[in-house]
Image (cartoon, helix red, strand yellow):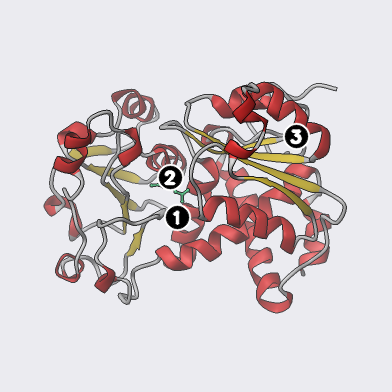
Amino acid sequence: MSKLGPEEAINGDFAGRDILSVNQFSRPDVEMLFGVASNMGRMVEERGRIDILKGTILATLFYEASTRTSSSFIAAMQRLGGGIIPITGVQYSSVSKGETLEDTVATLGCYADVIAIRHPEVGAASKAAAATEVPVINAGDGVGEHPTQALLDLFTIQAELGTLDNLSIAMLGDLKNGRTVHSLARLSAKFGASLSYVAPADLSMPRELMDELDQLGIDQNSYESLDPVIESCDVLYVTRIQKERFEDAEEYERLKDSFIITPEVMRRAKPKMVLHHPLPRVNEIAVSVDSDPRAAYFRGMRYGLNVRMGMLPLVIGRSVDDIGIYAA
Ligand code: NCD
């Protein structure tokens, strides 16, 4: 048995597929996943759990810090009745003995039916995918991508605004190093979003990514101030300055508080818009903004659980019809 090549299009069939990049998803793939995720959301509200993945196991292999992504994958699997192998402190695994990524992943592939991996290097998830026959889900590869986060971000936006069509999405913060914005820009482009990038000059959206989206005819504009976009955006997606990606601590100190969203800033935004953040937040959204009804980042975590509950059965090979019967 061999898997399809990494990063190949999903094309309506998630079974056995690695989830490495949002580029694998067409708009119908996203819509199919969101349909299942919505069912999961309803089911969790009504019953809390459903045993459609009983007897299957998820391994989470995290070489980088995580609270939300690792716990929501684990919670998703447990609410689906499956088991987990959580390796969150790789320093306590054979990694500390010098085992390669490939050998560690091949090992977990002997025990688990699906592996979610986070690693500081771009391309590590693809490397992992090539080392095992079981599906590998990229839960963040350095400054590369974080596809399940982008899917949950888009699901959150849809749930909050009721549509994904022709939105004006402003992304703010560390656009150079933030993998979530790299994935979200690519994914929202598939829905015709126009994208505004607001960042200090040294942390701007990578040129290659902008070129990639230019080829698709996506409307993209870059700014160093929020002023041109705050009154017109439908979504303001705020990100943390990615401290761990800086070689120079002084550079981080200089840039860390470049933008702070306060109630004053929110007063200028549309009454119907979404303020979102992948979290963790450091200082870029004032706590006093949390009670603003447009602040969606805490609700986003619940939506993220629903999306991961939708994705796991699909990649493990359950059909939408099967899941539909259980989730109805
Ligand atoms: C993000 C990540 O790890 O890229 N967190 C997350 O998964 N929700 C964002 C970040 O760390 O800033």
Q: Residue at 31% x, 70% y: name it.
A: 272
User: Nearest the camera: 287 or 10?
Assistant: 287
Q: Disc 2 and disc 3: Cα gap in Å?
A: 33 Å
Disc 2 on helix, strand or loop? Answer: helix
Where does label 1 land, which residue?
164
The relative height of residue 255 versus residue 237 in the rendered view (above or below) is: above
Closest to the camera, between mark 2 and mark 3, is: 3
Q: Is residue 37 left or right of residue 317?
A: left
Disc 2 packing (10 Å; few <14; some 14–19; many ≥20): many
Q: Quadrant of the C terminus?
A: bottom right
In which quadrant of the rendered view does residue 59 lie? top right
Label 2 vs 1, first from the N-terminus: 1
Disc 1 packing (10 Å; few <14; some 14–19; many ≥20): some
User: Nearest the camera: 133 or 252?
Assistant: 252
Q: Marks 1 and 3: in contact by CB < 8 Å?
A: no
**Residue 147 position in % (x across, y down):** 52, 41
**Residue 1 position in % (x across, y down):** 85, 22
Q: Amino acid at mark 2?
A: Ser
Disc 3 packing (10 Å; few <14; some 14–19; many ≥20): many
Where does label 2 land, which residue?
188
Mark 2 CB within 8 Å of ligand 1: no
**Residue 285 position in % (x across, y down):** 26, 61
Q: Residue at 75% x, 26% y: name it.
A: 106
User: Nearest the camera: 278 or 314?
Assistant: 278
Q: Residue at 76% x, 66% y: name it.
A: 327
Q: Disc 3 and disc 1: Cα gap in Å?
A: 37 Å
Q: Residue at 64% x, 51% y: name it.
A: 33
**Residue 200 position in % (x across, y down):** 17, 39
Q: Amino acid at mark 3?
A: Leu
Q: Is residue 89 visible?
A: yes
